[in-house]
Image (tube, rainbow, N blue to C red):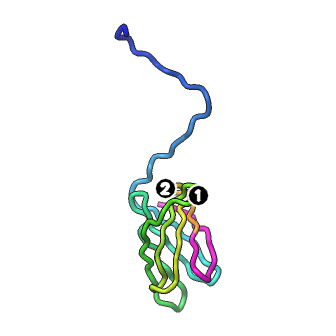
């Protein structure tokens, strides 16, 4: 090389990677039976879901990473009152940030989409 800077140009589609969100991200929604939830992610990992419903004591489900699903989306598992299985799918693909979504499933309750914000 002659010491001069050089550039390599690639043609094709460019991926616009979003930088990881800093701080804590909250994803909120409601199940069909009236329970409202707020899933919490810190450092791109979901750690808990807080459940609230009028007339009932609030409940916290602690989440643990389970695996990535067939579409490469992180899946977390926990339980509601240590009895009912809770599943959270991070639809952002591991980079939760404002504007992304989660899918939350509770055994016998069905599934719900939650929207994320900071």
Q: Quadrant of the N terminus?
A: top left
Classify residue 7 as left or right of residue 113: left
Disc 2 on helix, strand or loop?
loop
Q: Residue at x 62, y 73 (%)?
A: 111
Number of residue marks: 2
Disc 1 on helix, strand or loop?
loop
Mark 2 sits on what residue? 94
Question: x, y percentage for residue 16?
Answer: 55, 40
Classify residue 90 as left or right of residue 111: left
- Residue 49: numbered disc: none
Classify residue 99 as left or right of residue 21: right
| Residue depth check, mark 1 versus mark 2: number of the one nearer the observer | 1
Q: Residue at x 61, y 83 (%)?
A: 108
Q: Residue at x 54, y 70 (%)?
A: 28
Question: x, y percentage for residue 56?
Answer: 51, 90
The local crowd at label 1, few if under 14, some if 14 to 19, many if 20 or more residues have their Cα within 10 Å, is: few
Q: Quadrant of residue 6?
A: top left
User: Toward the viewer: 31 or 117?
Assistant: 31
Looking at the image, the residue that sits furthest to the left is 3
Question: x, y percentage for residue 71?
Answer: 59, 56
Q: Which residues are magenta?
A: 104-118
Q: Residue at x 58, y 74 (%)?
A: 105
Mark 1 sits on what residue? 70
Residue 55 drawn in magenta: no
Q: Is residue 109 above or below residue 101?
A: below
The prevailing secondary structure element of the residues shown in magenta is strand
- Is mark 1 in CB contact (under 8 Å) with mark 2? no
Q: Is residue 118 above or below residue 60?
A: above
Mark 1 → mark 2, Cα distance in angstroms: 14 Å
Mark closer to the chain start, 1 or 2: 1
Q: Is residue 19 above or below residue 87?
A: above
């Amino acid at each position: 090389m002659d010491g001069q800077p050089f550039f390599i140009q690639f043609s094709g589609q460019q991926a616009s990677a979003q930088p990881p969100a800093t701080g804590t991200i909250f994803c909120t929604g409601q199940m069909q039976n009236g329970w409202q939830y707020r899933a919490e992610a810190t450092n791109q990992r979901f750690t808990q879901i807080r459940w609230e419903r009028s007339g009932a004591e609030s409940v916290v489900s602690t989440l643990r990473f389970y695996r990535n699903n067939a579409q490469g989306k992180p899946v977390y598992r926990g339980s509601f009152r240590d009895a009912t299985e809770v599943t959270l799918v991070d639809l952002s693909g591991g980079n939760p940030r404002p504007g992304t979504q989660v899918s939350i499933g509770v055994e016998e309750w069905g599934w719900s989409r939650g929207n994320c914000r900071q």
